[in-house]
Image (cartoon, grey):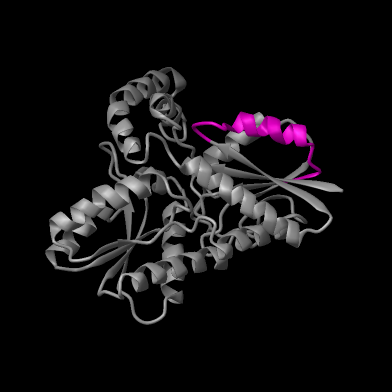
Amino acid sequence: MKRLAVVLFNLGGPDGPKSVRPFLFNLFNDPAIIGLPGIARTPLAALISTTRAKAARANYAVMGGGSPLLGETQAQAVSLEAALSEQLPGVEARCFVAMRYWTPLTQDAAREVEDFGPDEIVLLPLYPQFSTTTSGSSLKAWRAAYKGPGRSRTICCYPEAEGFVDGYVQAILRTWEDAGRPSVKLLLSAHGLPEKVIAAGDPYQAQVEATAGAITARLPGRWEVEVCYQSRVGPLKWIGPATDEVIRRAGADGRGLLVAPIAFVSEHVETLVELDHEYGHLARESGCPVYLRAPAVGVAQTFIDSLAGAVVAALPRDGVADAGGGRWCPRRWGRCPSEKAVSP
């Protein structure tokens, strides 16, 4: 029986208060996050992780002390294995979780895959939209860590994948209907990035906006929709508009809001604390009569089936491509990792 390893990449999160500071250190010591030489980056990461640890622990305390991201990702791995067993009879398909900044780290997952001894490997970031700061960093770490057997290929992104988009459409509509179909503006919120990252050729913002366009096109009726970006930190100028600024503006206009986190496929601190608690409080304080938040797609069957289909379609290929087997990014996005033909 052939063996297939599917490696699921995600950010990771601290599993308790004691792991918050080392998690932050790993995050800020990544050259994809702070692009300084190691001799400068490492002490800076130590400083940032120390100064931010107390506030970060308070955020994680809201969720019981640690991040639920690993549990959510493991549930997706189990669901994806089940879907692959149906689509690939006669193949032993196993999913492995590789977290970038906390356990199970990339090197831990690499050892597990080596022990499994796969014939085929599919690398699958759980970041729908590609960025050098997320998928790019995870893939680089994997290439450095894995020395075992198996023919490998990579799915770099799936910003407009039908099952992913439909999963969010269903979540948005279910949230709206459960609330009694109130009058709301739909905010499609994604994690932000410094403008200089995008200016250097990172396709993330273009892919986020493509996801938003695909969701809007599938929503029935007429919705007022705005794309916005959350989690801004530091002195650099970030892409916008910022989610908190949009919320304040909606409150001033007396508008209700429904927020969907379209760059996150699992619940974690940016959704459960930032969106639900911090921005929920901001919305009420600003005067929004309604504030709703659609959940991440998680293990929604449409999403899992879409991932399984992308894995199966990738098996005959080599190299790096989007979920459709090509290159999503136009030529101007030079940080796209795809080796396929460049679109206009």
Residue 128 showing in the rendered view: yes
Q: How many marks?
A: 0
Residue at image position (52%, 43%) is: 71
* Residue at the extreme bottom: 221
State the image quarter where residue 231 is shown. Answer: top left
Residue at image position (35%, 70%) is: 178
Image spot of residue 143 (x, y percent): 65, 35
User: 135 above or below 111?
Assistant: below
User: 87 above or below 6?
Assistant: below
Residue in the foreground of this view, choosing between 199 and 255: 255
Image spot of residue 55 (x, y percent): 27, 32
Residue 239 showing in the rendered view: no
Residue in the foreground of this view, choosing between 291 and 117: 291
Is residue 156 one of those drawn in magenta? no
Image spot of residue 341 (x, y percent): 64, 59
Q: Which residues are magenta?
A: 100-121
Does residue 289 appear to the left or right of 263 in the view shown?
left
Image spot of residue 4 (x, y percent): 76, 47
Residue at image position (47%, 50%) is: 266
Viewport quadrant of the C terminus: bottom right
Residue at image position (30%, 52%) is: 276
Residue in the foreground of this view, choosing between 324 and 249: 249
Residue in the foreground of this view, choosing between 306 and 144: 306
* Residue at the extreme right: 1
Does residue 200 appear to the left or right of 107 in the view shown?
left
User: 296 above or below 258?
Assistant: above
Is residue 120 one of those drawn in magenta? yes
